[in-house]
Amino acid sequence: MRRMPAHWRILAALALATGLAMVLRRLGAEAPEGAPVHAVTASLISFCRFAGELFMRALKMLIVPLVVTSVVTGITGMRGVQGFGRLGMKTALTYLGTGSIAILLGLAMVNLLEPGLDGGVPNPVIRDAFASSAASAVSPDAARVAAAGERVPGDFLAVFRSMLPENIVHAATDNGQLLGLIVFGILFAVALTRLPEGELDTVHRFFRAAAAAMVVVTGWVMALAPFGVFVLILPVVYETGAHLFVNLGKYFATVLLALALHLFVVLPLILRIGFGVNPWAQLRAMRPALLLAFSTASSAGTLPVTLRCVEQGSGVSRRVTGFTLPLGASVNTDGTALYECVAVMFVAQVMGVELGFAGQFFVVAAALLTSIGVAGIPSASLVAILLILKSSGIPGGEAAVVALLSVDRLLDMSRTAVNVFGDSCVAVIVAKSEGETLRV
Ligand code: ASP
């Protein structure tokens, strides 16, 4: 019997987990206190949490060896720094271009739909909701935001700092410092290309074999993906109540609509009109990675699968993916950049702050810069949002971010999928411009 394709298995797991979580919520609400259903559900949720953590750890375990081996094989395979310079320039420009379009799209949508206003005036219900989130100052969310708030002023420079880690081993062990690891990997690989031909060949063959072994290990972890998605999603759906969507419904709609437009209209148009790529084939090739990004809310965690889909599905060479995708997972975050802009403008609307052209321009520039430094892990962009709110002098930033953090999961899952698709598009665009024959 033929096995079901990976994306169907993952989608089935997603649907099953959502259905079961909703049934459990219903049963829990109807059963009296102390009924066995509560104990069974609690055990199931803790099992899922633990199993989900194991799955995430397995994915994260792949990141450092994959980043190092792909960056090094990608660059040493190019033989010569000119090739790399050209590729690097194209990649950086495409990242900047798609990121800016995403932010402007977010800006247009938030100005058009005005989710923070009610009949043209700041929405008092949402403002109260912000205040009551801040009042629960003992919650872990509030503590996290307060900790981030303390180190926020002047932290725009953090992006540049993280490019040059003091200690490369430390960078490799810290999820947020992927960028430092990549920069070092690039320097190391470019230095290798300066070695005499014989020595370069030996090192290149070593890294190529190591990268091939990592692809095999990724395949093993991917075989567990449906189970991983099931155990990650079940607790999320079980704990997310409908009340969250009532107050913030218009905000959710604005973010999701803008993300959907970027994913299904803007990026496909760029692929089709600009580069003659079939966008639907590209979306199809990326299905397992998109579903995994959606389930894990981590583009760094999804990187192993993104690499696999772009190489095996879209047919892009390791030479291009090895460089563009690890870098993209760390710096190219279209969904995050768009979200940062919408969130900041939304808080400004709720707090009754009118941002003129200069104010909005600052938000756009800040979203572009900070999205580069946002780590590919769940809810990482909330710290950047707090930084932009504080720097633009919008009051109530911390209370607002606590409130947004407590309803972040669905939006995080959606923007992470957009981040991953954006990375894959850049890899395809660069490969196409290098004359590669693709399958999309
Ligand atoms: N979760 C996102 C990612 O992994 C980052 C964020 O926007 O919070 O790409």
Image (cartoon, rainbow, N blue to C red):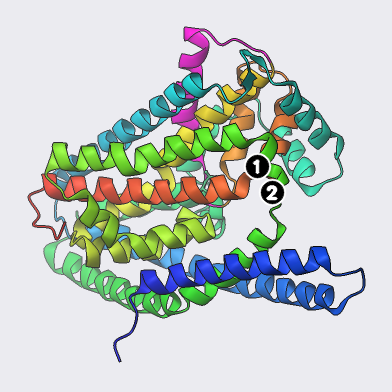
Q: Which residue is mark 2?
A: 242
Tell me which residue sits at (85%, 70%) in the image: 31
Q: Position of residue 310 (x, y in %)?
A: 26, 60
Which three-letter amino acid code belongs to the residue tagged 2?
Ala
Callout 2 touching callout 1 (CB < 8 Å): yes
Tell me which residue sits at (58%, 32%) in the image: 250
- Label 2: few (<14), some or many (≥20) within 10 Å? few
Quarter of the image where the N terminus is located? bottom left
Q: Position of residue 101 (x, y in %)?
A: 34, 29
The dominant secondary structure in magenta is: helix
SS label for mark 1 = helix
Is residue 255 positioned above or below 176 on the image? Answer: above
Relative horizontal placement of residue 300, taking residue 231 as reference (left or right): left
**Front residue of 437 and 235:** 235
Instruction: Give the number of the disc on residue 121.
Output: none
Tell me which residue sits at (81%, 63%) in the image: 29
Q: Position of residue 292 (x, y in %)?
A: 45, 62
Which image quarter: residue 22?
bottom right
Tell me which residue sits at (76%, 69%) in the image: 27
Is residue 337 positioned above or below 79 on the image? Answer: above
**Front residue of 428 and 7:** 7
Is residue 324 positioned above or below 74 on the image? Answer: above
Q: Which residues are magenta?
A: 352-377
